Amino acid sequence: IGEWSLDKRHYGGAYPPRNLQLPPTTGHSAINFAPKWLAMAWNEASAKIATWPKTKAMGTVGWRRESPTDAQISASPLASAVVGSSWTWGGVSGLAFNAHGLLKTPWGEGKWGILPATEGSAEAIFCDFASALHNVKFDLAAGTFVSRRVGDGETVQGTRE
């Protein structure tokens, strides 16, 4: 799975959102029209179904979830700010963003990484632990974050310790 991915298995528990982002115009997608055609067909179909359910599922971007390298952390102001820090998760202490994308939580080990900025959305961090994927948006000035669980959109707030 690359940064862009359209796979029916992503949506086993929820409908995909309308207006899926089209694949990049570089790399494999530049020579293979199938991904673009499929995304356009999906968008056309969902647009014509008036009763298409609202969903909190992720679209086609953000599926590649690899721990960051030291160079990637250094290049990211957000990742640089959170590495080595501790936070609460829904009021529970013990969420630690360790080096090399290692995540310590009260519920076990996990991993964290960088979700690049996309059109209309700032850079964010992912936290994957306890068999769940979470996309986390930080307000570093306020020392807070809001996490949205992939699939059902459940939100959790956190604060810097």
Image (cartoon, rainbow, N blue to C red):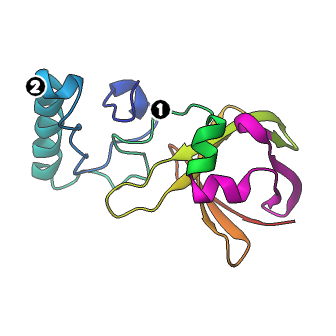
**Quick one: which residue is furthest to the bottom in this view?**
142
Residue 61 image point, x, y percent? 37, 42
Magenta includes 88? yes
- Amino acid found under the numbered disc labelled 1: Arg
Picture coordinates of residue 94, whole percent (x, y): 89, 51
Image quarter hosting the N terminus = top left
Picture disc at residue 33:
2
Say left or right for 127 vs 95: left
Q: Residue at x 77, y 40 (%)?
A: 99
Residue 25 visible in rendering: yes
- 129 or 54: nearer the viewer: 129
Q: Amino acid at mark 2?
A: Phe
Question: Considering the numbered disc 2 on the image, is that residue within a helix, a strand or a loop?
Answer: loop
Q: Residues within 10 Å of mark 1 (few under 14, many from 20)?
A: some
Q: Relative to 117, is 25 above or below?
A: above
Q: Give residue 60's quadrant in the image.
A: top left
Q: Which residue is mark 1?
A: 64
Question: Residue drawn at (45%, 35%), measured in percent from left and top?
Answer: 63
- Taking the image as shown, residue 147 lies to the left or right of residue 42, namely right
Label number found at residue 123: none
Q: Nearer the viewer, residue 105 or 156?
A: 105
Indicate the position of residue 126 as horizontal and vertical percent values: 60, 45
Position of the C terminus, as image quadrant, is bottom right
Would residue 123 appear left or right of 23 to someone viewing this image? right
Percent across and percent down for residue 134 are 60, 46
What SS does tag 1 mark?
A: loop
> For the magenta stretch, what is the residue range?
76-103
C-alpha distance separating marks 1 and 2: 21 Å
Left-right relation of 20 to 91: left
Verify whether residue 91 appears in magenta.
Answer: yes
Residue at horizontal 10 percent and vertical 44 percent from the top: 44
The answer to which of 118 and 56 lies nearer the viewer is 118
